Image: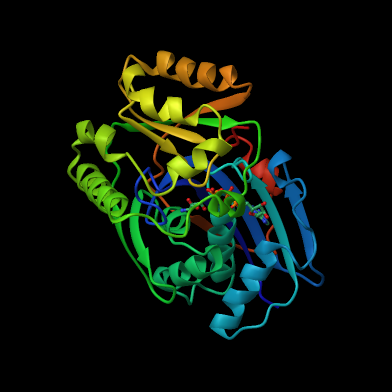
Amino acid sequence: MNNRRVIVKVPASTANLGPGFDTLGMALSLYAWIEMSAAETTTFRLYGDQMQGIPTDKSNLLYQVAQLVFEEAGVSIPELDIAMYSDIPLTRGLGSSASAIVGALAAANGLIGSPLPDHKLFQLATKLEGHPDNVGASLFGGIVVSAWDGERADYVRLEPHAKLETLVAIPAFQLSTEKARHALPSQISMADAVFNVGRSSLLVAALASGELGLIRHAMRDRLHQPYRAPLIPGMSAILEHAADYGALGAALSGAGPTLIAFVDADSKDKPQLEQFLLATLKQEGIEAETMWLKPSAEGPVITVEDAASPAPGLMERIKGEVVR
Ligand SMILES: Nc1ncnc2c1ncn2[C@@H]1O[C@H](COP(=O)(O)OP(=O)(O)OP(=O)(O)O)[C@@H](O)[C@H]1O
Ligand SMILES: N[C@@H](CCO)C(=O)O
């Protein structure tokens, strides 16, 4: 029997960054942890509020993803002991599904001695998630620019500016990516396509060159945000006015409903910006939780141990790092 125990810490992510629909992603300093080892019988230990409703049988996404890795690598480990704790809220636009996919890929790969290179994990993750933006960020950390044609995913990773910080406002309701994608039109005008190509290109160049002052104009979007706005009351006002309250720029995070503002970490305007986001949502009857998050420079951090050696449980191991 395989005698390893693997623990993986994997970051949340924000996708699109405004105009880069299904293309741009950034890893955030909010994490999930997965522990995995071979077992006689498959068992799941899922901890924390975020894991409520997640299946604890072999239909579980983590189990399914692990089996895909074993299949690709030509090994057989049919029974697994899996534990997971996550600080990443489910179905809120912070890449919970991508972090689960990337965490499970990294854990399963680590369990069998890491035969699959990161590039292969990226292809698998993109196919599973359906788009490369969140999984690229969770897998490589930092800011990831990616493109996928349905077969092949390519990417470039950018180092986030040292002063870049984000404020997320997480509404107290869930919005599935599936529902938020259904709100999108099947066709757009040439004028809107040109608008987005310009903004997305400018945003990547601004992030790559550190010209943070350009972000405000570069984060504008006509591909998805206007169509999703009716699903998130208060969103339009926040995107329009966040810069007046000190944000470098603002966007819907992934498919929403979370809203994200990019901020200079040294800005004195941080309290008034936070107040503006909360008050605007409240005016629409929406309770929200805010969090200040930094870009996460790293993707999965993997620890491999001898499964026979004594070890603390997952919650004991991570207790100093958990935030929620
Ligand atoms: N740890 C997990 N184990 C199993 N399934 C998970 C796990 N985490 C997320 N999921 C699945 O992913 C779904 C959420 O994915 P969805 O794409 O709708 O939102 P998100 O990934 O949180 O946000 P976004 O993609 O907009 O950033 C959950 O409802 C659940 O089915
Ligand atoms: N690019 C995706 C991210 C959410 O999974 C979307 O906006 O639908």
Where residue 142 appears, as percent x and y from the top left, is: 36, 48
Front one among 227 and 274: 227
**Left-right relation of 161 to 26:** left
Q: Which residue is drawn at 32% across and 39% down?
A: 220
**Left-right relation of 245 to 185:** left
Task: Give the quarter of the image for residue 50.
Answer: top right
Front one among 60 and 253: 253
Q: Is residue 247 visible?
A: yes
**Vertical placement of residue 245 versus 91, above or below:** above
Q: Is residue 28 visible?
A: no
Where residue 295 appears, as percent x and y from the top left, is: 39, 40
**Vertical placement of residue 317 versus 37, above or below:** above
Where residue 296 appears, as percent x and y from the top left, is: 41, 43
Q: Residue at x 54, y 53 (%)?
A: 181
Front one among 224 and 164: 224
Number of numbered discs overlaid on the protein picture? 0
Coloring scheme of the render? Answer: rainbow
Looking at this view, name the residue that lies furthest to the bottom.
Answer: 74
Q: Residue at x 66, y 62 (%)?
A: 62
Quadrant in which the C terminus is drawn:
top right
Task: Give the quarter of the image for residue 273.
Answer: top left
Where residue 48 appears, as percent x and y from the top left, is: 72, 41
Q: Which residue is drawn at 48% across and 46% down?
A: 254
